[in-house]
Amino acid sequence: MTLPSHTGSALHPDTWDLPTSTHLAPYLNWGQVLAKLGWEHAHIVVLTADLQHANRLYDFSQVHPRRFFNFGIAEKNMVSAAAGMAAAGLLPYVATYASFIGLLCAEQIRTDICYPGLPVRILAHHAGITMGFYGTSHHATEDLSILRSFAGMTVFSTVDPHLAEAALRASVDHPGPIYFRLGRGREKPVYALPPADFAFGRAIAMRDGHEAAILATGLPLGAALEAAEIMAAEEGVSVRVVDMHTVKPLDAEAVLAAAATGVVLTVEEHNIVGGLGGAVAEVLAEAGARCRFRRHGLLDEYALIGPPLALYAHYGLDAAGIVRALRELL
Amino acid sequence: MTMAERETLLAMLRDRANFCRRETIRLIAIAKSGHYGSVFSAAEILSVLYYHVLRYDPQHPDWPDRDRLILSKGHVAVGLYPLLADVGFFDPALLDSYTRLGSPFGDHPDMRLIPGIDFSSGSLGHGLSVGGGMALAARVTGRAYRVYVLLGDGEMDEGQVWEAAMSAAHFKLGNLVAIVDRNRVSVDGQTAEVMDIEPLADKWAAFGWRVLEVDGHDVEALVDCLDGLPNPASGQPTAIIAHTVAGKGVPFMENRFEWHLGYLAPDDQARALAGLEEKR
C-alpha cells in the first residue's frame, strides 16, 4: 500500500501534511488488517467520521470502497447507523477518536448496540492522553469505566499493533459488541508477532515473577515491562507483568494469581476510577484476597497540556514512574 | 384494483386503525400508564403500513428481504404490538402480559424479544440513523427492501435526526422513507411553544429529501402516498409529513398535550371506547 505524498513536492522531507502524517505513525495497522480481513469476509464494512487519514482506515477504503462509509463529523449518527447495518447482517467496524466514540456516543453504544447485543466493533483510537497537547476534549481517560458498565460489551485495550491484529482477527467470529481501545500507532511494539493463542478475556503473562505483580493494560504495558527489568536489576525484586488486554470480561484467575505474590499494582492510561484498577479491585475484594494493592493511572484529574511522552512522564506512566509506584507499595 | 376492492381495502384499514386504538386502551389499562395521545395520532399510519404497504412474512420474521419499520418514536409500541399479533407474528394472548414482570412487551419495543420488531427503540433521535444503516446494508448485500422510519414531531428537536437526514441524502438512500407523525404536541405542550420545528417541510427539502405532505388520518391519502413512492433507484430519500391530531378518536384527548401520557380508569375506558365507536 503506497500512501499519497504531500501536496507540495518541492517541500522538505520533514514537512508533513495530513496524508503524509501517517508516516509518523507506522504502527497504525488496523486499516491494513481490516483490508485483509475484508477479502476473507464479505460482510465486513468500515465506517469513520472524517478521519480516514488520521486513523489510516484509508488502507481499507482504497481496496474496499463499496464497503467503506465516511459519515462526516457526525459520530452519533455513524454509531447508530452501524447498529442498523449489524441488524441487517453486516459486520461493522466503526472508528473515530476514543474521546468522541467512547464518550460522546456512549448512549448510542449502550442503547443501539449493547442492548440489542449487535456485533458492532468500535475502534476507539488515540485513547487515553495520547493526544497530548490537544487537551482534555481529545483525551479519553474515562472510556474503560463507561464501556465496562454496558452489559454484554467486551472491552479490549491494546499495547501495540501485533496484539491489535490478533484481536481484530479474533473479533470476526466473536459474539456481541467489542470496544477496541487503540493508541496512536507511534510507540515501539512490545509483541514480536500477533500472539497465536490470543483470546478475549484471557490475560497474557509477559514476564514471570513472585514478589510482586503488575497488571497493565494498553500502552503502559511496555513501560511496566521496563519497570520490572529495573526492579530486578537494581533491587533484585522479582516482578511479574501481565497484559490485561481484556478489561471485560476480566481474567479473574490471572488477578488472583497476581495477588498470590502479595503485591499487586494496576497500570493504565486512564482515570484510576472504574477502569482496570477498579475491575481488579472488585475481583480482589470479592475473593477476599490478601495483598498490598494500588491503582496507578490518572488520579481522578484532567491531564495537563503537554506532548504525550512528557505527559506519560509527568503522570508516572513511564518506567521510572511505575518503579516509583512499586517502591512505595513494597 | 376495482373500486369495490379499493373501498373494501380502505374500510379494512380504517377498522384496523380503530382496532389499534381499542387495543391500546385495553393494554394501557394493564400497565396503568401509557402514551394514548401519540398512538392515536399514528394509528392510521401503522394500519396502512402493516395491512397494505410493508412486505413481511410473519412465519419468517427474520426474512432478509423484508421491508423494515423502525419505530423511532418507540413509545407507540403499545399500538403496534396488537397489529403484529393480528397479522400473525405471535399469539395475541401473549399481549395480556403487557408490561408485567418478564413480559416481552414493554412501553418501548425490544427486537430480541418480539418477532416483527425490526429494531429496539425508545431513545428519541436514533431511529433515522439506524434506518439509514439498514438502507446502506441493502446496497452492500444487494437486497431490494425499503426501510421506513416513523418519527415523532417532537423528535425533530434531536440533533441526531438531522445528522441522519444529511447522511441519507449524501448516500442517496432512495430506499429510505421517513414518516413524521406531525401531531403538534410533545410532552410539555404544543411543539410551537416547546420548540418550534417549522418550517419543517423546508428543512427536510433543504437537507436533500423529497418531501410529501399528507393527512395522516386519511387512509386513502396514505395509501396513495405510499403506493406512489418513487423507485428506490431514484437515489433520493423521501420524507412524508403526516399531519395528525394527538389523541385522535377520543374527543377529550384530541390536541391535548396532557394526554401524551396517562391512564384511564375503567369508567373512562368505556367513555373513550364509546367515543371511538361514534367516530366509525
Image (cartoon, coloured by chain):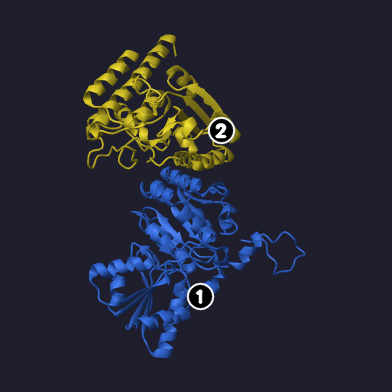
Q: Position of residue A180 (x, y in %)?
A: 44, 60
Residue depicted at 63% across the width and 64% down the height:
A21
The kind of residue tagged 2 is Trp
Badge 2 vs badge 1, beta-carbon distance below 8 Å: no
Mark 2 or 1: the one toward you: 1
Q: Compared to B85, does A277 lie above or below?
A: below
Q: Element type at marker 1?
A: helix
Instruction: Determine which residue is flagged by label 1.
Output: A314
The kind of residue tagged 1 is His
Q: Position of residue A229 (x, y in %)?
A: 43, 84
Residue depicted at 34% across the width and 33% down the height:
B77
Residue B204: which numbered mark, if any?
A: 2
Answer few, some or many: residues within 10 Å of disc 2's Cα (few below 14, many 20 plus, some between 14 and 19): many
Q: Is residue A143 left or right of residue B98?
A: right
Q: Position of residue A264 (x, y in %)?
A: 33, 76
Chain for mark 1?
A
**Which quadrant would residue B80 be assigned to in this image?**
top left
Which sits in the foreground, B92 or A59? B92
Chain for mark 2?
B
| Disc 2 and disc 1 on one polypeptide chain | no
Which chain is drawn using yellow? Answer: B
Q: Is residue B148 visible?
A: no
Q: Position of residue B92 (x, y in %)?
A: 25, 29
Query: What is the distance, in whole Å, between disc 2 and disc 1 at their CAs?
Result: 51 Å
Q: Is residue A60 left or right of residue A218?
A: right
Which chain is drawn using blue? Answer: A
Q: Quadrant of the N terminus of chain B?
A: top left
Q: Element type at marker 2?
A: helix
